[in-house]
Amino acid sequence: MILKSLVAAALYLIIYFWFLYLLRKPRLWLPVSMRDKLIGVLLLTVLNGYISISGAVVDLWILFISVTGIALLFYIIAAPAYALLPSRPLLVQFIAWNAPRIEIGLLLPALILLFYVSNLKLRALLITAILMESFWYLRLWMKQRYKKAKTLDEYSLLVLKAQANSDIKRFAKKHRILELQTVQEQISWLGCTQQSFPCPMDYYVNTLGLNTPPCCRDNMREMLHRIDSDLAKIGVLHWIEGGTLLGAVRENGNLLAWEDDVDISFLLTEENTWQKMVASIKKIARHAHYQVIVFEKIESIYIYYDPPGPWPFNYERTRMRGEIRIDMHGYRVSRSNGNNVVERFTSKGLLQKNRKGKFEMPSELVLPLSVISFADRKVSCPAKPGDYIKAMYGNYTEVEYTWIEKDAANARRQIDQKR
Ligand SMILES: [Zn+2]
């Protein structure tokens, strides 16, 4: 009997950690592969079959409880990842934002079931799930103490006041912005650090239309400078890219006000092979205690500010509401329609797809690399930063509020036009 309970608990843990591993992809707007989905379905079938079948009899009632219970719980666990997608349905946003409350609400029926159900395998499953969830929220709560007070700059305060209709206290309470501390008229921001969990930046920026919190901005800048200088030291050709380059060019070497990640691209060559590049990034990340996720097929590397958890908890980060991240994409020099180009696997802005199915940029815009000021430091950038940004975004001098909710974007537009 004990053995059966242990098997049920172990099966649940395998599925739980597998599920967290799968969630790394939707978080990055990448599709989950058919193979990974099938493994998930197979594992779930084995677990639910194991719980509900004894001898040759299927207990349909037990099967129903275990299938709906797992579906419900995993929907809640997945919500933060899906709330990061540009489409982000309202229900998913609501669940992502209220996950701890919803789970506390589910605890009571789970305890009642535990009391009334005599199936030991289902009991083991319930206990394991309750323990894992309690453990996760306990650790989240304990990480609070690593947060550090920061000041909001004038512009961020202006945006906050406008979006809050001047009643910041009410706004903070209504949207549960835990970082916002208001003591009388004094406003401060309890900022994230590498040891705490990150602020739910996407929610503050995209849904509420606020500026990126000061802590997240500092942490992104720190990461950018570190990766840039470490790559320069070992001679890897790389350049800031996308929104980061746009900030450097248009905002005088600052991050965009609502920036949510840092983009750095790298050149893959005969000397700097994919394997070498991955090894270099992993080495740099190890020293800085960053976590790295690698996708070889699209030659992309993602670096996260939070340190990796011990196995099998290393993908538990996919449950967090926010993240501070550098997106790195590999380019290769090639020829296309008689022109020299650099090309990458993933689409970006207005980059054109070529006959090989890759996305290309004229190589004279990139090479030889140059430098540009970014947050009081010189960082590596394309040969012609302005033309590069134009090829990627068109008329980049016009400010566009990408991914921000319509109402929040409208309120922002008014502030920004007055500035
Ligand atoms: Zn933060």
Image (tube, rainbow, N blue to C red):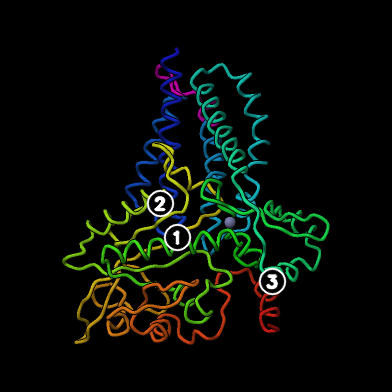
Residue 293, given in percent of the width and then of the height, sits at 37, 52
Any magenta on residue 57? yes
**Mark 2 CB within 8 Å of ligand 1:** no
Q: Nearer the viewer, residue 199 or 376?
A: 376
Q: Is residue 330 left or right of residue 395?
A: left
- Determine the residue positioned at 67% across, 41% down: 101
* Mark 3 vs 2, N-terminal side: 3
Q: Which residue is mark 1?
A: 223
Q: Position of residue 78 (x, y in %)?
A: 52, 47
Looking at this view, name the residue that lies furthest to the top.
1
Toward the left, the furthest residue is: 270
Categorize mark 2 by other alpha carbons within 10 Å: few (<14), some (14-19), many (20+): some
In this view, 102 is above or below 387: above
Residue 31 is covered by the magenta coloring: no
Residue visible at 31% across and 75% down in the picture? 359
Q: Amino acid at mark 1?
A: Met
Q: Quadrant of residue 309?
A: top left
How far, Cα to Cα, is label 1 from label 2? 9 Å
SS at mark 2?
A: helix
Name the residue type under label 3: Glu
Query: Quarter for ligand 1?
Result: bottom right
Q: Earlier in the sequence, mark 1 or mark 2?
A: 1
Q: Is residue 405 left or right of residue 86?
A: right
Q: Earlier in the sequence, mark 3 or mark 1?
A: 3
363, above or below 376, in the image: below
Name the residue beneath numbered marker 2: 288
Q: What segment carries the magenta color? A: 52-65
Residue 248 vertical position relative to residue 312 in the rendered view, above or below: below
- Given contact means CB atoms under 8 Å apart, are the residues at marks 1 and 2 in contact? yes
For marks 3 and 2, give the CA distance: 31 Å
